Image (tube, rainbow, N blue to C red):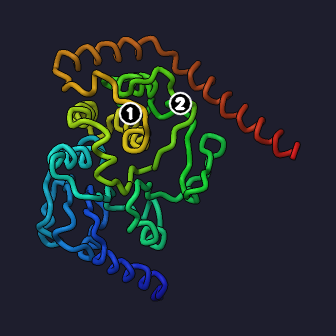
């Protein structure tokens, strides 16, 4: 049975031809046929699939499959830092099927200010996540995901945050866009030095599923759109000796972890938040 609404929605992507934004698209195994709707001079695909995609477009660069899609974004920023487009759309190949629908995407895509491409209606995990008014949400900062991925340089989010920023007070909640899809004006990218981005890519390029990529995903709003200053470490290019010291420190901290205690603590924190929320609702 033909879904006419779906066909009409897909056809609406032809409006991308009118966009003046530049698209930096990270491709692994999603559908990228929709890029045909963008003017060729206005996009580049970073191809992590390990396959030839000449049958779709020749406007791509093949790269290693490391650091999730954020590796693609960092490579683009570093390679074009002195000649960035006025506005760049950073997105994954599967942005429509996983992170927001086409209708919302087209409503947001011509924004010329920093904009997260996300839809909180696809996330329902209160009180770990709290919905915001701009189709986004915040997540409790407890590094709940860190046991699921390899950690090489930072044992938890707070360690990562305090290293890349000049701020000792780690946030209780993190504003971030799952999947790391953004519209970013050049001025926002240039808030950080080129060395800052060169250092970030070193933290995530050791594995396809590096945990530091998850820390970075949760830091992009702060990196691109805040007055939190970069640390002195990040404005100077980190060398191999620095990386070895970070690796040793991370390994030591991981060896001291009591996973059971941490998981119980996180569980109690979330349940307590939910209880407080219910009490406040009753008092209204």
Mark seen at residue 182? none
Residue 159 lies in quadrant: top left
* Front in this rendered view, residue 52 or 182: 182
Residue 270 lies in quadrant: top right
Residue name at image x 20 percent, y 49 percent: 76
* Front in this rendered view, residue 203 or 4: 203
- Return the residue at label 1: 149
Q: Sequence order check: which comes first, mark 1 or mark 2?
A: 1
- Return the residue at label 2: 171
Residue name at image x 38 percent, y 54 percent: 181
Apparent side of residue 31 relative to residue 58 in the rendered image (left or right): right
Apparent side of residue 182 relative to residue 27 in the rendered image (left or right): right
Density class for disc 1 (Cα within 10 Å; few <14, some 14-19, many ≥20) is some
Where is residue 180? Give x, y as percent.
39, 50
156 is higher (above) or lower (below) than 108: above
* Front in this rendered view, residue 184 or 241: 184
Cα separation between marks 1 and 2: 22 Å
Where is residue 72? Give x, y as percent.
24, 48
- Of badges 1 and 2, nearer the viewer stands 2
Apparent side of residue 173 relative to residue 219 in the rendered image (left or right): right
Residue name at image x 28 percent, y 18 percent: 247
Label 2 secondary element:
loop
87 is higher (above) or lower (below) than 202: below
Residue name at image x 52 percent, y 38 percent: 174
- Disc 1, disc 2: CB below 8 Å? no
Disc tally is: 2
Residue farthest to the right, as pictured:
283
Where is residue 156? Give x, y as percent.
44, 25
256 is higher (above) or lower (below) than 179: above
Label 1 secondary element:
loop
Density class for disc 2 (Cα within 10 Å; few <14, some 14-19, many ≥20) is few
């Amino acid at each position: 049975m033909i879904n006419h609404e779906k066909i009409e929605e897909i056809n609406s992507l032809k409006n991308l031809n009118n966009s003046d934004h530049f698209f930096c698209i990270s491709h692994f195994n999603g559908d990228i046929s929709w890029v045909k709707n963008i003017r060729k001079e206005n996009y580049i695909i970073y191809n992590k699939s390990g396959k030839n995609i000449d049958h779709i477009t020749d406007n791509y660069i093949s790269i290693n499959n490391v650091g999730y899609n954020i590796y693609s974004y960092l490579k683009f920023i570093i390679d074009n830092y002195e000649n960035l487009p006025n506005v760049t759309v950073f997105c994954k190949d599967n942005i429509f099927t996983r992170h927001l629908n086409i209708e919302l995407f087209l409503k947001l895509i011509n924004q010329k200010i920093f904009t997260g491409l996300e839809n909180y209606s696809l996330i329902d995990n209160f009180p770990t996540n709290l919905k915001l008014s701009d189709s986004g949400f915040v997540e409790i900062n407890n590094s709940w995901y860190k046991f699921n991925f390899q950690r090489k340089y930072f044992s938890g989010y707070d360690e990562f945050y305090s290293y890349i920023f000049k701020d000792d007070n780690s946030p209780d909640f993190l504003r971030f866009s799952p999947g790391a899809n953004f519209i970013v004006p050049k001025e926002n990218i240039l808030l950080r030095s080129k060395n800052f981005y060169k250092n970030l890519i070193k933290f995530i390029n050791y594995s396809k599923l590096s945990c530091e990529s998850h820390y970075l995903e949760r830091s992009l709003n702060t990196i691109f759109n805040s007055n939190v200053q970069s640390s002195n470490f990040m404005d100077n290019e980190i060398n191999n000796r620095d990386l070895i010291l970070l690796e040793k420190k991370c390994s030591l901290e991981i060896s001291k972890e009591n996973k059971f205690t941490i998981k119980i603590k996180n569980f109690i924190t979330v349940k307590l938040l939910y209880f407080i929320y219910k009490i406040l609702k009753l008092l209204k």
